[in-house]
C-alpha cells in the first residue's frame, strides 16, 4: 500500500485537478496543485475541511445524494457542478469520481474538469525513477491509481527506458489512440500518426524531455483526428540508464468546445463591432467596486479617446468625459439599478475636449451573483442626432419660427403655471399686451421681408427691456406679450414696477429701425393687466390686457393703459352686439334708407344707400351704433354684400319708370370689403344677376383704403370702371391720401366731408378747405359733392364757389324708398334757395 508521503509526492506533481477526501465526512485528505490553482484556495484552507464547508456542495443533503449514487455504481462521470472561487469567479465544472479504499477507510478520488472554455486542465503525470523501481506491489498500486485517473480524465501514460523494447503503454493509452499492442513495435512512439504540421514540435519535445505541455493532433485509425495534450519528462537515471515518462490526454471535446466558443465570440464581436453603440458587461463586487468584464470595440467611437481595453483596466476612466452637471445623476441611476436589481435606463451627456456636447443613452439588466456581487449587461448608444431632432421639434412646437420667442402655445402654458402659482401665494405678476401701430400699412407698403425684419428687431428690443426670468412671447402677427412675474404682493407697488417697464419698452421701441436701407419709425400700443389670485383663467387675463391695449390705441397710440374693470362692461356690450348682429343677418333685420343727392337747382339726381338695423327691442339703429363692431367681427363682408344687392335691385325697379330711370345709386364700401380677394367678382356678379345698370352704380370708398397696396387698389378700380361702375372718394380731407395718389386713381367724384361744411360760414379754415377741394376737383375733372348741407347759407356759399352736387338734411334725411319724393322729381326739393330741414 502507498503510504501518505508517497501519495502526497505523487498527488502534488499531478497537473490535473485531483482530490482525495474521506467518504464518511467529506474532509479533504489531499489535493493536487492543479486543483488548488483551479479552485483558488491555498492548501492550508482546504486540508482538514469538508467539501460542504468549503462550498463545493450547496448543502449536506446534495452531497449525500451524490455519494449514494457513487456507492451504488462505484463511479461517477460527467456530473455538472458550479462553484464560486474566493475571488467571486463562477466556475462551471465537470466532476468525475470513484471510490478507493486507503488505510482501511473508504475515500473518494475526484477529478475536476473546467468547462468554462477559458483554460483547460493541464495534464502531466510525472513519476520518479524510485517510484518506478519500487516494489511490484507498490507499482501495481500506482498503476491501479493511474488507471483510475485514465478512466476519469480520458488519458493514458507511457514509460520507457534506455534499453530497446522497454516502451510500456497503459491500457488507457491503447484505447485512447486506437492502437493494437503489436503496432507499437513498428512505430515506437506513434509519430507516423501525428499530423505532419505537428511532427517538428513533437520531436523537439521528445528530444528535450523537459516536461513542457505539448499540443498536437493524432490520426485515429477510424479516421478521426484527435486533439491531444501531452507531457514528456526524463524522470531519473544517467545517460546509460534513464527512465522517460509521459502522459497523453484526449482534449478533442474541449478543443471542439473551445473552437465553437471562439467562433461564437468572433461572431458576437463582428455583430457588436457593427452595432451603433457599445455592448458592455460590468460587475460590482461586495465592496462596491465596479469593473468592466467586457466592452465591445466601438468604445472609442462612443467615448472619444478611451479604448475598450482602458475601460476594462479602469471602469472609472469614462467619468472624466461626463458632463459635470450629469455625473451625480448618472452615478445615482447606476447604483439604484444595481441595488434594486431593476433594469437601468438613463440619458446623459458627454462634454468633449473641444467643448462639443454628445448625448448618450445607456440601458442594462442587472442580475445577482454570489457573495453580494451584481453583474449588469447592457448597451450604450449615441442619441445626439435624436436629441437635436427633439430640440428642433420642440422649437417648432413651442417657439416662433421668425423671432425665436415663445409662441402662443408656450405662452399659454407659462401663464397657466403663473396662475397656479398666484393661487397658492400672494404674489402678483403683470402681463403687457403689445401691438405695433400701423404695422399692416408698413407691411403692405414695403413688403413682408421688411415687416419680418421689423418684427425680429422688436423681439430683440423687448428681450433687452426685461429681466432674463421674464417671458417675452409673440402671440401672432404684430402682437407680443410680456409676462413680468412675481413683482410683489401690493397692487400699488406692482403697478409702479409694471409702468416703469412699460415706459422702458415704449422708449426702446420708439428708436429708429434700420431695415434694408430704410430708416423707419414704429410705435407700440401697450395694454397692462395684473395677474393675481383674483384672475380665474388665462383667457380672462389676456382679454383684460387686450382691452387695455385697445384703450391705448383709442388714446392716440404709442402709449400705455392699465386694464380698468369698467372696460369689461364695454366688452360685454360689444359681445352682445356681435351676437345680435349675427342673428340680424339670419333674421333679415336690415333695411335700406336713401338720402337724396341734388344738383344746383336742388333737383334730385341720385341717392346714397344707407343701411339701418331694425332692432327687435331697440328700434331703428343708425350705422354709428353697429358698423365699427361689424368691421371688427368681419360681419361687414356679408352685410356689405347684402347692401350692394339691395341697392342694385332698387336700381332695376326704378329703371321701369322714365322719371327714376336715370337716378344714380351711391353705395358705401368698407376698406375690409374692398380688400377681399373676391370683391371685384362679387360686384360684377351682383350687377349681372340683378340686371342693374352699372353706369348708375357709384361705389364710395374712404381715404384709409389708399394707404394700402395702391397698385392692387388701382387694378380693382380699373376693372370695375371698365364695366361702367363709377367711384367716389368719401370724406375727402379727413384721411391720408396724397395728391400723387389721387391723380392716378380712376375716380369720378370727391365728397367734401360734412365736418368742413358745418362751419364753412364761420370758420375761415373750413371755408378755405372747402374752396381748395372744389378747385382741386375742377382741376382733376372730378365732380364734387358737398355732404352735410343743412342751411341755405351753406348751400349758397358752396354753389357760388362752383359746387354742383349737394347732400344733407336741407334736401332730405335718409328715409325708406317709399318716402322719397319720386313723384315730383322735376321740382326742386328746396324752393327759392330756401328749404325745410324736415
Image (cartoon, grey):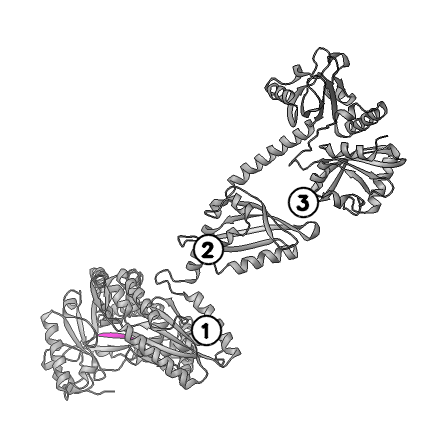
Q: Position of residue 88 (x, y in %)?
A: 68, 47
Near-viewer residue (770 or 607): 770
Q: Which residue in the protein does label 3 denote?
A: 89
Region in magenta:
605-610
Please state which of the two labelled residues, at mark 2 or mark 3, is closer to the viewer: 3
Residue at 18% from the left image edge and 84% from the top image edge: 830
Kindly state the secondary structure of the residue where label 2 is placed.
helix
Kindly state the secondary structure of the residue where label 1 is placed.
helix
Q: Using the numbered discs, state the Cα–Cα distance from disc 2 to disc 1 in whole angstroms.
A: 29 Å
Q: Position of residue 731 (x, y in %)?
A: 21, 76
Query: Toward which corner of the image does residue 736 lie, by quadrant?
Result: bottom left
Looking at the rendered image, the quarter that the N terminus falls into is top right
- Answer whether residue 609 is magenta in the image: yes
Residue 639 in view (yes/no) = no
- Earlier-in-chain disc, 2 versus 1: 2
With 491 as the anchor, is 702 left or right in this view?
left
Please state which of the two labelled residues, at mark 2 or mark 1, is closer to the viewer: 2
Q: Which residue in the protein does label 2 denote?
A: 390
Query: Toward which corner of the image does residue 588 lie, by quadrant?
Result: bottom left
Q: Position of residue 470 (x, y in %)?
A: 40, 72
Residue 654 in view (yes/no) = yes
Q: Using the numbered discs, state the Cα–Cα distance from disc 3 to disc 1 in whole angstroms.
A: 67 Å
With 456 as the anchor, is 768 left or right in this view?
left
Kindly indicate whether the residue at mark 3 contacts the one at mark 2 (C-beta within 8 angstroms): no
- Answer whether residue 33 is magenta in the image: no
- Earlier-in-chain disc, 3 versus 1: 3
Q: Using the numbered discs, state the Cα–Cα distance from disc 2 to disc 3 in whole angstroms.
A: 44 Å
Residue at 31% from the left image edge and 78% from the top image edge: 503
Residue at far top of view: 186
Count of marks overlaid on the render: 3
Amino acid at each position: 500500500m502507498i503510504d501518505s508521503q508517497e501519495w502526497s509526492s505523487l498527488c502534488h506533481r499531478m497537473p490535473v485537478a485531483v482530490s482525495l477526501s474521506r467518504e464518511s465526512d467529506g474532509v479533504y485528505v489531499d489535493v493536487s496543485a492543479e486543483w488548488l490553482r483551479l479552485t483558488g484556495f491555498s492548501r492550508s484552507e482546504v486540508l482538514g475541511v469538508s467539501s460542504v464547508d468549503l462550498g463545493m456542495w450547496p448543502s449536506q443533503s446534495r452531497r449525500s445524494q451524490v455519494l449514494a449514487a457513487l456507492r451504488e455504481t462505484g463511479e461517477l462521470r460527467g456530473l455538472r457542478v458550479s462553484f464560486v472561487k474566493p475571488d467571486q469567479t463562477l466556475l462551471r465544472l465537470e466532476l468525475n469520481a470513484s471510490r478507493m479504499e486507503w488505510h482501511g477507510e473508504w475515500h473518494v478520488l475526484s477529478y475536476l474538469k473546467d468547462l468554462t472554455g477559458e483554460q483547460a486542465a493541464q495534464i502531466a503525470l510525472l513519476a520518479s525513477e524510485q517510484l518506478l523501481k519500487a516494489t511490484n506491489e507498490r507499482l501495481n498500486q500506482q498503476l491501479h491509481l493511474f488507471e483510475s485517473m485514465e478512466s476519469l480524465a480520458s488519458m493514458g501514460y507511457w514509460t520507457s527506458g534506455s534499453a530497446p523494447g522497454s516502451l510500456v503503454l497503459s491500457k488507457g493509452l491503447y484505447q485512447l489512440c486506437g492502437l493494437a499492442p503489436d503496432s507499437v513495435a513498428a512505430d515506437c512512439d506513434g509519430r507516423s500518426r501525428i499530423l505532419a504540421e505537428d511532427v517538428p514540435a513533437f520531436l523537439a519535445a521528445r528530444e528535450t524531455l523537459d516536461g513542457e505541455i505539448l499540443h498536437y493532433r493524432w490520426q485515429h485509425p477510424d479516421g478521426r483526428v484527435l486533439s491531444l495534450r501531452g507531457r514528456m519528462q526524463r524522470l531519473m537515471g544517467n545517460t546509460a540508464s534513464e527512465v522517460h515518462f509521459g502522459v497523453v490526454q484526449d482534449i478533442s471535446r474541449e478543443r471542439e468546445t473551445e473552437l465553437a466558443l471562439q467562433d461564437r465570440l468572433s461572431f458576437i464581436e463582428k455583430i457588436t463591432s457593427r452595432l451603433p453603440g457599445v455592448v458592455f458587461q460590468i460587475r460590482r463586487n461586495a465592496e462596491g467596486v465596479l469593473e468592466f468584464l467586457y466592452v465591445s470595440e466601438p468604445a472609442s467611437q462612443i467615448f472619444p479617446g478611451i479604448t475598450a481595453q482602458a475601460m476594462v483596466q479602469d471602469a472609472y476612466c469614462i467619468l472624466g468625459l461626463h458632463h459635470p452637471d450629469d455625473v451625480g445623476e448618472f452615478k445615482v441611476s447606476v447604483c439604484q439599478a444595481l441595488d434594486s436589481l431593476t433594469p437601468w435606463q438613463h440619458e446623459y451627456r458627454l462634454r468633449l475636449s473641444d467643448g462639443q456636447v454628445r448625448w448618450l443613452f445607456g440601458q442594462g439588466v442587472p442580475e445577482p451573483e454570489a457573495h453580494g456581487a451584481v453583474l449588469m449587461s447592457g448597451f450604450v448608444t449615441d442619441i445626439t442626432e435624436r436629441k437635436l431632432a427633439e430640440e428642433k421639434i420642440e422649437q417648432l412646437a413651442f417657439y416662433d419660427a421668425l423671432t425665436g420667442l415663445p409662441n402662443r402655445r408656450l405662452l399659454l402654458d407659462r401663464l397657466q403655471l403663473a396662475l397656479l402659482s398666484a393661487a397658492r401665494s400672494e404674489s402678483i405678476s403683470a402681463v403687457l399686451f403689445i401691438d405695433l401701430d400701423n404695422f399692416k400699412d408698413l407691411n403692405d407698403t414695403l413688403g413682408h421681408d421688411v415687416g419680418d425684419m421689423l418684427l425680429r428687431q422688436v423681439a430683440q428690443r423687448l428681450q433687452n427691456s426685461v429681466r432674463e426670468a421674464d417671458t417675452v412671447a409673440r402671440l401672432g402677427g404684430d402682437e407680443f406679450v410680456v409676462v413680468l412675474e412675481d413683482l410683489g404682493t401690493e397692487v400699488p407697488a406692482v403697478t409702479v414696477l409694471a409702468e416703469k417697464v412699460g415706459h422702458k419698452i415704449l422708449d426702446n421701441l420708439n428708436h429708429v429701425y434700420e431695415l434694408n436701407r430704410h430708416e423707419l419709425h414704429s410705435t407700440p400700443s401697450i395694454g397692462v393687466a395684473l395677474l393675481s389670485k383674483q384672475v380665474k383663467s388665462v383667457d380672462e387675463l389676456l382679454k383684460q390686457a387686450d382691452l387695455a391695449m385697445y384703450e391705448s390705441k383709442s388714446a392716440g397710440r404709442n402709449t400705455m393703459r392699465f386694464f380698468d374693470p369698467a372696460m369689461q362692461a364695454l366688452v360685454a356690450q360689444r359681445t352682445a352686439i356681435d351676437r345680435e348682429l349675427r342673428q340680424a343677418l339670419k333674421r333679415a333685420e336690415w333695411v335700406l334708407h336713401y338720402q337724396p343727392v341734388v344738383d344746383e337747382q336742388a333737383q334730385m339726381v341720385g341717392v346714397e344707400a344707407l343701411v339701418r338695423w331694425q332692432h327687435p327691442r331697440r328700434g331703428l339703429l343708425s350705422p354709428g351704433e353697429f358698423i365699427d363692431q361689424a368691421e371688427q367681427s368681419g360681419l361687414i363682408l356679408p352685410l356689405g354684400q347684402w347692401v350692394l344687392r339691395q341697392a342694385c335691385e332698387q336700381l332695376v325697379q326704378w329703371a321701369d319708370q322714365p322719371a327714376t330711370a336715370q337716378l344714380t345709386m351711391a353705395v358705401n364700401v368698407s376698406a375690409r370689403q374692398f380688400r377681399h380677394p373676391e370683391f371685384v367678382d362679387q360686384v360684377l356678379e351682383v350687377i349681372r344677376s340683378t340686371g342693374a345698370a352699372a353706369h348708375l352704380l357709384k361705389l364710395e370708398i374712404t381715404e384709409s383704403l389708399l394707404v394700402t397696396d395702391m397698385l392692387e387698389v388701382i387694378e380693382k378700380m380699373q376693372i370695375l370702371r371698365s364695366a361702367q361702375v363709377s367711384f367716389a372718394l368719401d370724406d375727402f380731407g379727413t384721411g391720408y391720401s396724397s395728391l400723387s395718389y389721387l391723380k392716378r386713381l380712376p375716380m369720378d367724384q370727391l365728397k367734401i366731408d360734412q365736418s368742413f361744411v358745418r362751419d364753412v360760414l364761420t370758420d375761415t379754415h373750413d371755408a378755405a378747405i372747402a374752396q381748395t377741394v372744389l378747385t382741386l376737383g375742377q382741376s382733376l375733372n372730378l365732380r364734387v359733392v358737398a355732404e352735410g348741407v343743412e342751411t341755405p347759407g351753406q348751400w349758397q356759399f358752396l354753389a357760388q364757389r362752383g359746387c354742383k352736387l349737394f347732400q344733407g338734411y336741407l334736401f332730405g334725411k335718409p328715409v325708406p324708398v317709399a318716402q322719397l319724393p319720386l313723384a315730383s322729381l322735376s321740382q326742386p326739393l328746396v324752393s327759392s334757395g330756401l328749404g325745410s330741414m324736415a
